[in-house]
Image (tube, rainbow, N blue to C red):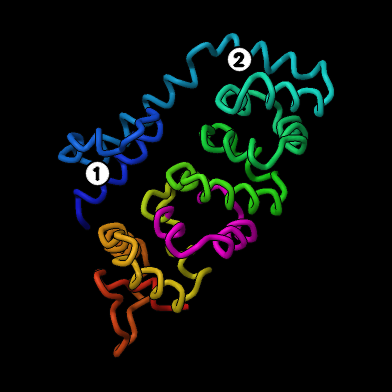
Amino acid sequence: MSRTSESRAETAKLARLLRASDPQALAFLLPIPAPELRDYREAVTDLLYDDERELLQRTADAARLLPARTLAAIGERALGPLFCARLTGLLDPRRAVEISAHFTVDFLAQLAAELDPRRAAEVVSAIATDTVVAVSATMAANGEHVAMGRFVAYLDDAALSRCLEALSDEDLLRVTFVMEGEERLSSVFEMIGAERAERMLAAAHVSGLVEEAEHVAELLDAVSAPARATPRGRKRPTGTAPTEGATKR
């Protein structure tokens, strides 16, 4: 597997976390091994979430005093998506889900783009599937593929399958390139099926995503079971490495 591609994926995630307008500004980090970049990114994430934690906790505690609809209005009109994302993991999960039901899809998409799902796994898993699908489509339209990749490991199969159906092939490739929980990549390819997987990887050159496609194909080979071998006579997608998982339903 290309170490450069792995580092590029991690650099893209770090650029999103740091709100870098141009991910290429961090190109100097590419020689650094991906595991080191990942550790640094997670340390920065922890620092951002721990900053002003006392204030956030007091705000979360006060959320018990007002109706969910009122809190949603305050969050969307005054606090903003970043502050609300930091609050989410400090709220009782059931309360957080109740409040989220009163947010607009556009605001939820902005909030999700700032959220660390590790800190709000129960909330993410409890959101209605229709809402998850709508939010994922909006995030894709906003170009938030890096943020979307963080949620793959936290969605149940039903929600993930519907989200995959709603995404274009290009959006799907961009998300799988940077997704967390890489062990679930083979499940993603099983859900989309061999025909779409091959189409997605083969068309990567059209959208200038050949490196992403090659990385995803190599990663899929690495996480797929040995028994899932590529059938003989199957044509390999143009511009990609052989991939076992993508060619078996």
- What whole-number distance in Å separates the C-alpha atoms at marks 2 and 1? 33 Å
Residue 137 spot, x, y in % from top left: 58, 52
**Quarter of the image that includes the N terminus:** bottom left
**Outermost residue, bottom side:** 233
- The answer to whether residue 138 is visible is yes
- Residue at position x 38%, y 49% in the image: 178
Q: In the structure shown, which secondary structural element does the residue marked by tag 1 occupy?
A: helix
* Residue 178 numbered tag: none
Kind of residue sitting beneath label 2:
Leu
Relative vertical location of residue 121 with respect to residue 165 in this rendering, above or below = above
- The answer to whether residue 219 is visible is no
Kind of residue sitting beneath label 1:
Ser
* Residue 56 numbered tag: 2
Of 69 and 87, which appears nearest the observer?
A: 69
**Outermost residue, right side:** 67
In this rendering, the count of numbered labels is: 2
- Residue at position x 42%, y 47% in the image: 180
In the rendered structure, the answer to whether residue 60 lies left or right of residue 190 reads: right
Query: Which residues are the magenta region?
Result: 152-175
The quadrant in which residue 160 appears is bottom right
Residue designated by label 1: 7
- Residue at position x 51%, y 44% in the image: 142
**Prevailing secondary structure class for the magenta stretch in the rendered image:** helix
Residue 243 spot, x, y in % from top left: 31, 71
Residue 168 spot, x, y in % from top left: 50, 63
